[in-house]
Amino acid sequence: MSQAINNYLINGSSPVTVGGTGVAAKYFPAPSGNFTAGASVTPSSTSAVGQLIVPADNRLHGQQIDIIAAGNFEVGSGGACPNVLIEVCANTGTPVSPSYTVLMTSGTITAQNLTGTFYDWQFSGRVMGTNGSGTLQGVYSAVVDTTVVKSNVHLENTISGLVWGAGTVGLNTASNLTPPAQGVFGLVVRVTFSVSESGNSANMYQFGIY
């Protein structure tokens, strides 16, 4: 794998976790001590604060970029084989008014009702774009619980209007993030459980652009 451009500083011993009750999408937080000022920051459907920013300093103009995310999940004991959906989304709006577009998805995964049994998931995407086109193109693969659910398929959606040299996504907030001060777009990962159970849980061990 090539050098990291930007990433959540997480690994097998220090993941970020979402879970609990509710059937709304749960967004993985940016960990404390990463590019936050001493506290974890969690994106949501109405705020992209904590997103992973693709820097807009022209070094990625016309370059292939790898987007990597990996983790695992378990389901609670009360739901009968609930469905789980994992998505990697791009934010082309602002931190306080996000506009999310799904780039990569696991599709609907039917999980077994086994508390304490974890199912691995991973995404690997390769994308690129130029100032001339303003669009993002690429392919990705996804594997969940040893099953290839997506294999070298095109991104789920096309995003356009991108500027690789002076983007407008910007800082999550001026007070809690370090440069890059501007971004082409932001990235978030979210998990949706179809059944509300306190035992629902998902970990993310890796999230970055390379």
Image (spheres, grey):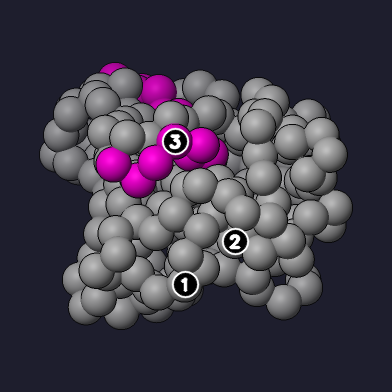
Residue that badge 1 annotates: 179
| Badge 3 amino acid | Gly
Which residue is painted at 47% across and 65% down in the image?
181
Real-space Cα separation, disc 3 to disc 1, in angstroms: 18 Å
Which residue is painted at 24% across and 25% down in the image?
23
Residue 86 falls inside the magenta stretch: yes
User: Is 98 rendered above or below residue 54?
Assistant: above
**Residue 205 in picture, x, y percent from top left:** 47, 64
Which residue is painted at 39% across and 59% down in the image?
171
User: Is 167 rendered above or below residue 85?
Assistant: below
Q: Quadrant of residue 115?
A: top left
Q: Magenta region: which residues?
A: 80-96
Q: Quadrant of residue 34?
A: bottom left
Q: Is residue 125 visible?
A: yes
Q: Secondary structure at mark 1?
A: loop
**Residue 90 in picture, x, y percent from top left:** 53, 39
Real-space Cα separation, disc 3 to disc 2, in angstroms: 15 Å
Most foreground residue, 145 or 45: 45
Are the residues at dot 1 and dot 2 in contact (C-beta closer than 8 Å)?
yes
